Image (cartoon, rainbow, N blue to C red):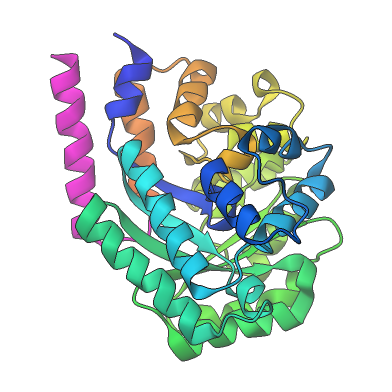
Amino acid sequence: MNIKAFIEGLPKAELHVHHIGSASPRIVSQLAARHPDSKVPADPDALASYFTFRDFAHFVEIYLSVVDLVRDAEDVRLLTYEIARDMARQNIRYAELTITPYSSIRRGISAGAFIEAIEDARKAASSELGVALQWCFDIPGEAGLEAAQVTLDVALDLHPNGLVSFGLGGPEIGVPRPQFAPYFQRAIAVGLHSVPHAGESTGPETIWDSLLHLRAERIGHGTSCTRDPALVRHLVEHSIPLEVCPTSNVATRSVKSLDEHPIKEMVAQGVWVTINSDDPPMFGTDLNTEYAIAARLLNLDPAGIAALAKNAVRASFTDSSAKAALCAEIDAYTATALG
């Protein structure tokens, strides 16, 4: 069987994908042309070299330059809807999109206008494209406690219908996780799930901090977990999923190469792994490509790939009926494909 074709047709869910980081070259170039004061090139061909990262710090610098291109509510709405359009092309049925309200609010977009824009796009994505979107509101860690407070205020005061979780992104080095504990506690108290990034550019200690201080229910990345056998046992015993993004980890130099990616060890030790694309256009990838990489690294047949897809559905924060429906769709597709 053609594995690539099987993956392309497979219904999928994605749990770790960033709003700004999902801006396609076409959309980025349009925004750059609208905002010529930006250093982001408007030429789509030039974006490939622009999106080549020396290290994680350089990635954050480039990422923030793209953030600066989203300057009004119409930019927000357009970007969000176009992300869903790209997801529909990949047969992604459900996605939890990581959104950073603070970045847009500090650039002059009101919180109300921002929420209205993403919610309008969410409704259109569902009705027009068949893609169900939900939100993770993400604290940009490099912006500190001010950003945490703004992110929490927007979540608590406006609480859009699509909001399901509360996250922490940006650099891990020099951004201790415990300082954000009060903000996560308040978010959890109103029913939001805790999904911080940890253990990508740092070691297992940031994963432990996220579990113990931020009450993490899933871990974004978590690639360093295999360095700590006690941590691996904890993740397995408590059924805590990891949002694994292979190409991203290599692009940011957090992992040396795909063949050295710890995903094989994670799965061998029983860790709950989900496959994700993180910032796909910036890394020259998409979710279908990440599944193909995972299939190669884990030596999966179509049934194994389908099981990996169901891992993401079960780890999601959608309701049980939606999970059952998507898992059933994956099973039906697989049965038909296998004849």
**Quadrant of the image containing the C terminus:** top left
- Foreground: 168 or 31? 31
Of the pair 318 and 211, the residue shown nearer to us = 318
Taking the view exactly as shown, the residue that stands out farthest to the top is 1
Check the image and report above or below for 12 versus 104. Answer: above
Q: Is residue 98 magenta?
A: no
Quadrant placement of the N terminus:
top left
Res 226 visible: no
Q: Is residue 94 above or below residue 102?
A: above
Q: Which of the two residues, 174 or 82, is positioned nearer the viewer here?
A: 82
Residue 10 in view (yes/no): yes
Image position, residue 5 (x, y; %): 32, 18
Residue farthest right in this picture: 174
Say whether residue 327 is left or right of residue 34. left
The residue that appears at 25% across and 51% down in the rendered structure is 129
What range is drawn magenta here? 316-339
Residue 78: which quarter of the image?
bottom left
Left or right of 93: which side holds 70?
Answer: right
Residue 44 position within the rendered picture, expressed as x and y whole percent measured from the top left: 62, 37
Q: Position of residue 210 (x, y in %)?
A: 66, 62
- Between 133 and 226, the one lying in front of the other is 133
List x then y, in percent, for residue 181. 67, 77
Does the magenta stretch mainly form a helix, a strand or a loop? Answer: helix
Horizontal side, residue 306 vs residue 115: left or right: left
Q: Residue at x 18, y 58 (%)?
A: 321
Residue at image coords 77%, 57%: 171
The residue depicted at 70 percent of the width and 35 percent of the height is 46
